[in-house]
């Protein structure tokens, strides 16, 4: 095959492959991501308002409580399989907020729990979220405990 025939063949093959691709709906995908990401942020703001008015939390305690509750809700939704459906619908809109972080840590741990606590649950939760994030959280908790006793 000569160079020109090979280029023609490659173009035909690429056109053939693209004929099987479903058309991408960019506007629809962006709208869904915006809608779900915004909804998650609105839920976080509602939690913040409730904790501020009903419980009387302010400042750093309020921010920490909202973050903890959003992580808890994200982990629970992952455990019940709901967050996967949200992710399929919303795409990137479900991974940007803090609940996406909870999902990225919890889903590998849940998936590999049959391999045991150490090799499955504990080791596999580092796969997606990355060891830096998990070690950072653990180091922050350790420093907080040490600070509490000093």
Image: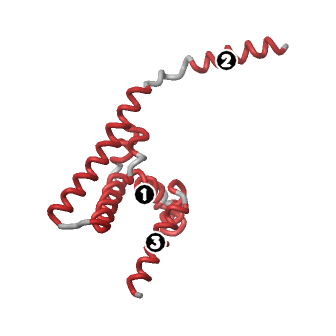
* Quarter of the figure that contains the C terminus: bottom left
Q: Secondary structure at mark 2?
A: helix
Q: Nearer the viewer, mark 3 or mark 2?
A: 3
122 shown above or below 95: below
Residue found farthest to the front: 59
Question: Distance from label 2 to label 1 (Cα)?
Answer: 41 Å
Q: Which mark is residue 140?
A: 3
Colour scheme in the image?
secondary structure
How would you rate the neighbour count of disc 1 (Cα within 10 Å): few for under 14, some for 14-19, many for 20 or more? many
How would you rate the neighbour count of disc 3 (Cα within 10 Å): few for under 14, some for 14-19, many for 20 or more? few
Image point (35%, 54%), residue name: 74
Residue found farthest to the left: 54
Rendering coords of residue 67 (x, y %): 34, 60
142 shown above or below 37: below
Image point (29%, 68%), residue name: 61
Q: Which residue is mark 1?
A: 106
Q: Secondary structure at mark 3?
A: helix
Is the residue under label 2 in contact with that under label 3 (CB below 8 Å)?
A: no
Q: Quadrant of residue 52?
A: bottom left
Q: Nearer the viewer, residue 30 or 122?
A: 30
* Quarter of the figure that contains the N terminus: top right
Rendering coords of residue 84 (x, y %): 39, 45
Q: Nearer the viewer, residue 113 or 33?
A: 33
Q: Which mark is residue 13?
A: 2
Q: Earlier in the sequence, mark 1 or mark 3?
A: 1
Q: Nearer the viewer, residue 82 or 48?
A: 48
Q: Earlier in the sequence, mark 3 or mark 2?
A: 2
User: 142 left or right of 3?
Assistant: left
Question: Distance from label 1 to label 3 (Cα)?
Answer: 19 Å
Is the residue under label 3 in contact with that under label 1 (CB below 8 Å)?
A: no
Residue found farthest to the right: 2
Q: Quadrant of residue 72?
A: bottom left
């Amino acid at each position: 095959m000569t160079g020109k025939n090979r280029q023609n063949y490659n173009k035909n093959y690429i056109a053939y492959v693209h004929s099987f691709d479903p058309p991408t709906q960019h506007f629809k995908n962006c709208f869904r991501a915006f809608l779900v990401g915004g909804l998650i942020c609105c839920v976080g703001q509602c939690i913040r308002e409730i904790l501020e008015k009903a419980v009387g939390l302010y400042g750093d305690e309020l921010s920490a409580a909202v973050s903890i509750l959003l992580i808890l809700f994200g982990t629970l939704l992952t455990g019940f399989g709901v967050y996967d459906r949200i992710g399929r619908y919303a795409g990137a809109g479900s991974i940007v907020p803090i609940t996406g972080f909870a999902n990225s840590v919890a889903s590998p741990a849940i998936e590999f729990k049959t391999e045991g606590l150490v090799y499955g649950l504990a080791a596999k939760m580092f796969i997606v979220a990355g060891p830096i994030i998990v070690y950072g959280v653990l180091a922050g908790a350790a420093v907080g405990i040490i600070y509490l006793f000093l």
